[in-house]
Image (tube, rainbow, N blue to C red):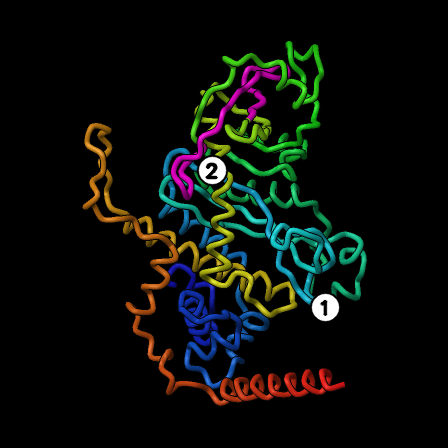
Amino acid sequence: MARIAGRFKRVEPRSSARAYLLGLLSSVERKNCWQLAEQAGHTRPGPMQRLLRYARWDADAVRDDLRAYAADHLGTDGAVLIVDETGFVKKGRSSAGVQRQYTGTAGRIENSQVGVFLALATSRGRALIDRRLYLPELAWCNDPERRHAAGIPETVQFATKPRLAAEMIEAALDADISASWVTGDEAYGQDPHLRNALEASGIGYVMAFACSTRVRINQGRTSIRADALTGRLPAVAWQRYSAGPGAKGPRYYYRAWIRIDTGDHRHLLIRRNRTTGELAFYLCWSPTKVALAELVRVAGVRWSVEECFQAAKGQVGLDHYQVRHWISWHRHITLAMLALAFLTAVAASAAPDRPTDPHHPARSSDPITLTVPEIRHLLPVALNSPATSTTRLLPWSIWRRHHQATARRSHYRRRSADELI
């Protein structure tokens, strides 16, 4: 909290921000303004709502502090920046950027908002360090009335998701985030402007892309589809590598790489599932010569961002917000990202030292590494917050419980009447 305290000029929003962060780190089930106000012992949710909507503070400045905090606690050699998006399913049409669109969160087209995020992944941990709310062009950018109602600034114009990713990567590099690689899925790997921007910045990338993409081999003289090229590879071209630890141990796949185009440092990386034979393709570029093992490591790190989304939504309420305004969305998301970065930093600092000598492996009696969920569950015990006591239930909270019980009774009476009919 000391990192961001200077961003709040008045004591009231500063105190509310601290209570908001503690609420996000607490065991409260739903982390919206009503529940967080109850957790903080407030008599009403007004202070939390003002914090997100009307209080004077810059969420982007807090984001900068968050980014520096994550770099200080997680930064190490071999850091990777990961770009990806996640959806927030919503009802109605008033929330900024909401429309019917595909979201991987639901696995189908849903009425939702989509946020593009940048994650920092190192051997010490991973955290979300930047965010952008995707604003659809037709439904929002060209509708002044909707923009005004949702508080979208006039300076915000339409930008594709890869363009938003490029802006976040550029900002991270300008902030001296030490990262050697960028990785992302097909939605970003297919965009040539993003790849060109990364090459101009001198940062390597390992980007997933479609099997139907054509690549050039034989010093650029031959153009061929990526999946067709796979069939020409000899058996000796495939090597067995681990993509990193999984729930059941190391994730082993067969890998092959082929030099493409006319550059010495541009490759096509192919991953083949040992059991199903399923293929995945990655376009790779590096400013200097690298080994296959390094490209495999970066490709495997990409899944860390999914773990970030899972932890952010499940532990600190990234998707629990009930706000519609552009500013409110960015403020809640930023504070949730800061809470997640704090948990990750605590987990990194609490990790026991492991022996580096392969001849002396870790013993079963050695302490285990605490995870982010475990630390989040321990925090309420350590803080011993009095607001968790049943004697601190607020009047409006009691009313809400009574109202829900009345609604359930009415529902059952209507259902019984329908059955009789």
**Neighbour tally class for label 1: few under 14, some 14-19, many 20 plus, Cα within 10 Å:** few
Residue drawn at x 54%, y 19% as measured from the top left: 257
Quarter assignment of residue 152: bottom right
Please state which of residues 220 and 250 is positioned toward the viewer in this rendering: 250
Give x and y (percent) for residue 140: 76, 58
Q: Which mark is residue 92?
A: 1
Quarter assignment of residue 390: bottom left
> Along the horizontal axis of the image, is 272 left or right of 232?
left
Q: Which residue range is magenta in the image? A: 243-270
Q: Amino acid at mark 1?
A: Gly
**Distance between the Cα atoms at labels 1 and 2?**
36 Å
Give x and y (percent) for residue 99: 73, 59
Determine whether the residue tagged by mark 1 lies in a helix, strand or loop.
loop
Please state which of residues 66 and 225 is positioned toward the viewer in this rendering: 225
> Along the horizontal axis of the image, is 61 left or right of 357?
right
Q: Which of the image's four quarters has the C terminus?
A: bottom right
Give x and y (percent) for residue 74: 37, 45
